[in-house]
Image (tube, helix red, strand yellow):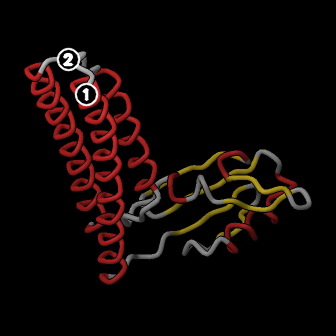
């Protein structure tokens, strides 16, 4: 009855969402994820993400660069990054915008770790919700007598095993991110 592939696909998507979500958390190291989703207003009012406007570079651990495809919009983009209030000060250097990451304070690191914990709990809840949806399906099948009590127990055990695997994956990813944040 239980389709392990469907459950695994749904839970894998939750892992992907979690990875994107925590990608923008500062770790003290430069990463393109810090700015790729920053929305700036260009071309007279059009809102676009940086990743749609140019190339993001990471020349070293403390610096990000942004090279717009349309150099004519470089000032608008720099102003948009400044206005996004993400803790980076853009400096136009010819056809490139440079941003240096300031050192994280101990308090900022602790705040990011707390935020990571909240994001982890949200992802865990999404996995549990997925488990509850599939458990309801097998409960309904048992109540409709389309599966036996033994099949129900087997499916329920399998569902819990898959759920535990994905919760463990989330926690492993979170631990790695916490190590990065702590520097």
In screen coordinates, is 30 left or right of 48? Answer: left
Place of residue 176 in the rendered image (x, y in percent of width and height, measured from the top left) = 24, 53
- Looking at this rendering, what residue extends furthest in the front direction? 144
Q: Nearer the viewer, residue 31 or 156?
A: 156
Indicate the position of residue 154 as horizontal and vertical percent values: 10, 23
Q: Residue 24 carries which label?
A: none
Q: In this view, does 19 lie to the left or right of 77?
A: left
Q: What element carries label 2?
A: loop
Using the rendered view, name the quadrant where residue 167 is placed. top left
Q: Is 82 rendered above or below residue 66?
A: below
Q: Of helix, strand and loop, which one carries label 1?
A: helix
Q: Mark 1 points at which residue?
A: 138
Quadrant position of residue 30? bottom left
**Above or below — where is 96 with respect to 6?**
below
Please indicate whether residue 95 sits to the left or right of residue 122 in the image.
right
Q: Residue furthest right?
A: 44
Q: For this rendering, which residue is in front, 26 or 9?
A: 9
Q: In which quarter of the image is the C terminus?
A: bottom left
The residue depicted at 21 percent of the width and 38 percent of the height is 163
Label ID, residue 147: 2
The answer to the question of whether label 1 and label 2 lie on touching residues, with beta carbons closer than 8 A, is yes
Report x, y in % for residue 93: 71, 63
- Front position in the image: 20 or 167: 167
What is the quadrant of the N terminus in the image? top left
**How busy is the neighbourhood of tag 2: few (under 14 within 10 Å), some, or many (20 plus)?**
some
Residue at image point 24% right, 31% down:
139
Q: Report the side of 115 relative to 146 (left or right).
A: right
Image position, residue 101 (x, y; %): 49, 70
**Between residues 171 and 137, which one lies in front from this camera angle?**
137
Vertical order, 88 against 151 (above or below):
below
Quarter of the image holding residue 61? Answer: bottom left
Question: Between marks 1 and 2, how big is the CA–CA gap?
Answer: 8 Å
């Amino acid at each position: 009855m239980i389709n392990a592939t469907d459950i695994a696909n749904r839970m894998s998507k939750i892992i992907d969402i979690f990875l994107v979500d925590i990608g923008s958390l500062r770790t003290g190291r430069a990463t393109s994820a810090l700015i790729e989703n920053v929305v700036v207003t260009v071309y007279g009012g059009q809102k676009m993400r940086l990743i749609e406007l140019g190339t993001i570079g990471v020349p070293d651990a403390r610096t990000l660069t942004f090279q717009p495809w349309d150099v004519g919009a470089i000032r608008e983009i720099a102003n948009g990054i400044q206005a996004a209030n993400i803790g980076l000060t853009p400096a136009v250097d010819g056809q490139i915008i440079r941003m240096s990451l300031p050192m994280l304070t101990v308090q900022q690191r602790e705040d990011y770790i707390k935020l990571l914990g909240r994001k982890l709990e949200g992802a865990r809840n999404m996995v549990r919700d997925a488990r509850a949806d599939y458990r309801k399906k097998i409960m309904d099948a048992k109540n409709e007598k389309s599966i036996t009590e033994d099949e129900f127990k087997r499916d329920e055990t399998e569902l819990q095993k898959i759920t535990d695997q994905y919760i463990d994956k989330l926690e492993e990813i979170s631990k790695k991110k916490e190590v990065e944040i702590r520097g």
